[in-house]
Amino acid sequence: MKALFKYSVFIIIFISSQSLSAATTDEIHAHNPWVREAPPNTKIHAAYMMFGNHTKKSFKIIKITSPVYKKIELHETKTVNGVSTMEHVSELTIGPNEHFVLAPGGSHLMLFNPDRALKHGDIVPFIFALSNGDSFSAEAKVKRVLGTVDSNEGASQHHNH
């Protein structure tokens, strides 16, 4: 009976430690990441997703990498007097309990010089480095998109919970 009690306590402690571990890895992550399929010889692709911060502190994404691309930049689309331009953004801050959307027609990732042609269904891994030294990762599926996107559809937004 004493051995059973010790074993039960061990299991409870183990399960509790696993729950704490899961909570820290889910603090910030990418929801529904995807890469737009492009013609085979295209050297610049775009990726979209929604970042979610599920804590009471801010997170700052300072660098994004992938073994598939030589360089990745965060870009923001701005429209002034009917003219849209893209601007490089050096970092992205996601406030407490906020979401930040990267979507066609808005903020997005510019992916430069892929190591191979990517097609619908391929998986692209991303690593997001944070200013506090931590990082998180995501896998994006390459998707074929038909038609055009309205410039107001999917504009970047901050969302509070």
Image (tube, helix red, strand yellow):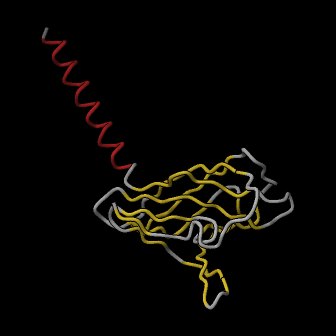
Quadrant showing the N terminus: top left
- Above/below status of 83 relative to 146: below
Please give the name of the residue rendered at 85% of the width and 57% of the height, measured from the top-left corner. Answer: 40
Please give the name of the residue rendered at 32% of the width and 65% of the height, measured from the top-left corner. Answer: 96
Q: Tell me where residue 120 appears, x and y as whole percent.
A: 75, 47
- Above/below status of 20 relative to 76: above
Q: Tell me where residue 25 appears, x and y as whole percent.
A: 39, 49
Q: Tell me where residue 127 appears, x and y as whole percent.
A: 55, 57
- Above/below status of 11 relative to 68: above
Please give the name of the residue rendered at 66% of the width and 48% of the height, measured from the top-left corner. Answer: 141
Q: Tell me where residue 91 appears, x and y as whole percent.
A: 50, 74
Please give the name of the residue rendered at 23% of the width and 25% of the height, measured from the top-left corner. Answer: 10
Foreground residue, 135 or 59?
59
Residue farthest along the top direction in this orientation: 1
32 on left or right of 8: right
Foreground residue, 14 or 120?
120
- Above/below status of 122 relative to 93: above
Residue farthest along the left direction in this orientation: 2
Q: Quadrant of residue 86?
A: bottom right
Foreground residue, 81 or 69?
81
Residue farthest along the right direction in this orientation: 41
100 on left or right of 46: left
Q: Quadrant of residue 36?
A: bottom right
Quadrant showing the C terminus: bottom left
